Image: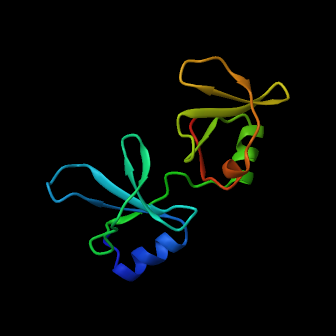
Amino acid sequence: MTLTAREAMQALLEGKTIYRRGFDDSERKYMFKLSEKGQTVEWFDNGWMETMYIPLNGIEDVIEEYPLNFEQALRAMLDGKIVTSDLYPHLKQRFHDGCFEFKEDDAEWRDTYFAHVEQKAKWKVVE
């Protein structure tokens, strides 16, 4: 499915991530979204970075990689699931033995809190 430029812009304004494939016929997806400041950002291997451009023509589709809002993520954790946010995708978070906890990669679980920016982030279940 290819989006029209209007549909691509609408998706961005709704806080969604759009993507297109590169011109080099590789499988790499070029992903774009608007930051909280309303600036265009592009996904690179080390995270979201500001970009000077955004292609609105040739957008293939919308990516809903992080479909949950903060409330939905909390409910998932209370249901025993492990989640991560688009803000800190390297952190896993859970609710365990009456406490919210987080960990990085192979580290131990530790108590956590949720900063204001995390409460505005998008989330997904990872386990």
- Please identify the quadrant where the C terminus is shown: top right
Q: Is residue 67 left or right of residue 9?
A: right
In the displayed structure image, the side of residue 48 where residue 83 appears, left or right = right
Query: Residue 58's spot in the image, x, y percent?
Result: 27, 71
Q: Quadrant of residue 15?
A: bottom right
Q: Is residue 42 above or below residue 37?
A: above
State the residue in front, 94 or 33: 33
Residue with the most extreme right position:
98
* Residue 22 at x, y percent in the picture: 21, 57
Q: Residue at x 82, y 24 (%)?
A: 97
Residue farthest to the left? 24
Q: Nearer the viewer, residue 16 or 67?
A: 16
Instruction: Give the quarter of the figure containing the N terminus.
Output: bottom left
Viewer-proximal residue among 70 and 80? 70
Q: Residue at x 53, y 68 (%)?
A: 38
Residue 77, quarter of picture: top right
Disc count in the image?
0
Residue 123 vs 58, above or below: the answer is above
Colour style of the rendered protein structure: rainbow
Q: Nearer the viewer, residue 89 or 48?
A: 48
Residue 76: x, y in percent?
71, 43
Residue placed furthest toward the bottom: 6
Please tell me which residue is depicted at 48% across the width and 72% down the height of the picture.
Answer: 11
Left or right: 53, with 103 as reference point: left
Which picture quadrant has residue 103?
Answer: top right
| Left or right: 59 in relation to 80 | left
